[in-house]
Image (spheres, rainbow, N blue to C red):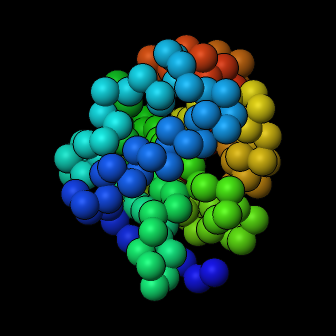
């Protein structure tokens, strides 16, 4: 399957929320303390329109079906951003799409921030391998208050 990656549109909001919720169910993250409870789900085109924020969606070429995405958003600490809501449906995994999304996110982040942080679930091991491949270092304590207390695997890297 061929994919197109582009910035999110308002018409993508519901599809992105479905992708995220589906992936969270798959990995047992459908509860408080994860993206599951984020009030911004379903409003990404609005949330990521702010300065220093961006969200990209991956869509099937032809059908336009949204199969994943990734975002960059600011955190409270000066010069620190977060890699946010990076999810891919199972059928879109293993094809290099996560790497393309990561490269876009890091390129954007480098123009706005000094460091990038992320949190994930312990059983999202394929994602952790991706983060490490892109130079993220695992850290033991949160670098910022994200509200994702159930995501206790944390990474950070300089940009």
Left/right of residue 109 with respect to residue 116 in the rendered view: left
- Residue appearing at x 47%, y 30% in the figure: 35
At which x and y percent is residue 90? 68, 56
Say above or below: 62 vs 35: below
Q: Quadrant of residue 57?
A: bottom left
Say above or below: 83 vs 130: above
Left/right of residue 13 with respect to residue 123 in the rendered view: left
- Residue appearing at x 25%, y 60% in the figure: 11
Say above or below: 21 vs 154: below
Q: Relative to the observer, which residue lies in front, 56 or 26? A: 26
Q: Relative to the observer, which residue lies in front, 26 or 146? A: 26
Q: Relative to the observer, which residue lies in front, 145 or 32? A: 32
- Residue appearing at x 52%, y 58% in the figure: 68
At which x and y percent is residue 113? 40, 46
Q: Quadrant of residue 125?
A: top right
- Residue appearing at x 48%, y 56% in the figure: 69
Q: Quadrant of residue 91?
A: bottom right
> Is residue 33 in sight in this rendering?
yes
Number of marks: 0
At which x and y percent is residue 88? 59, 55
Left/right of residue 123 with respect to residue 86 in the rendered view: right
Quadrant location, the N terminus: bottom right
> Is residue 154 in sight in this rendering?
no
Q: Relative to the observer, which residue lies in front, 44 or 12? A: 12
At which x and y percent is residue 94? 75, 65
């Amino acid at each position: 399957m061929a994919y197109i990656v582009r910035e999110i549109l308002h018409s993508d909001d519901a599809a992105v929320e479905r992708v995220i919720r589906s992936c969270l169910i798959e990995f047992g993250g459908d509860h408080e303390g994860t993206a599951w409870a984020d009030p911004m789900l379903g409003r990404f085109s609005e949330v990521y329109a702010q300065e220093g924020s961006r969200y990209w969606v991956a869509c099937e070429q032809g059908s336009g079906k949204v199969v994943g995405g990734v975002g960059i958003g600011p955190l409270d600490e000066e010069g620190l951003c977060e890699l946010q809501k990076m999810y891919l449906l199972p059928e879109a995994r293993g094809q290099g799409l996560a790497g393309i999304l990561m490269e876009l996110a890091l390129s954007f982040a480098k123009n706005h921030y000094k460091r990038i942080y992320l949190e994930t679930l312990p059983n999202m091991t394929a994602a952790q391998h991706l983060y490490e491949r892109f130079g993220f270092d695992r850290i033991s304590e949160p670098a910022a208050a994200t509200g994702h207390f159930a995501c206790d695997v944390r990474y950070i890297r300089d940009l």
